[in-house]
Image (cartoon, helix red, strand yellow):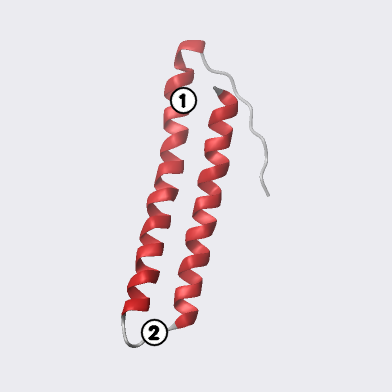
Amino acid sequence: MRVKIAYTVEFEDVENEVKEIMQRALLNIEQACQESQEATNNLDTGDVDILTVIKRLDSARRKLSKADMVISDCQEIL
């Protein structure tokens, strides 16, 4: 469940706050890329565990979704 948290910062600190929040989005994107790469690597092997590939792809999608929400929040802030 997502909840909205409100707090105040000085106007000149808004950019730095958004930058810090964006770091979370970037981390999620990096992790999604890693999960996707691992899923792809699993498909390259002769001994494919499809369930593992599906789980990695689901994890990548969830991380991308989180990143999208964070980026949307940052867009609204700015």
Give the amino acid at mark 2.
Val
Q: Position of residue 70 (x, y in %)?
A: 54, 39
Q: Is residue 5 left or right of residue 61?
A: right
Which residue is denoted by mark 2 in the rendering?
A: 48
Q: Position of residue 44 (x, y in %)?
A: 32, 78
Foreground: disc 1 or disc 2: 2
Callout 1: few (<14), some (14-19), or many (20+) C-alpha neighbours within 10 Å?
Answer: some
Q: Quadrant of residue 45?
A: bottom left
Q: Are marks 1 and 2 in contact (CB under 8 Å)?
A: no
Q: Which mark is residue 68?
A: none
Above or below for 18 versus 14:
below
Q: Residue at x 60, y 27 (%)?
A: 76
Q: Quadrant of residue 53?
A: bottom left
Above or below for 13 versus 69:
above
Q: Residue at x 43, y 56 (%)?
A: 32
Which residue is denoted by mark 1 in the rendering?
A: 17
Q: Is residue 13 left or right of residue 38?
A: right
Task: Tell me the distance, in whole angstroms, between the alpha carbons under discs 1 and 2.
Answer: 43 Å
Q: Is residue 38 left or right of residue 8?
A: left
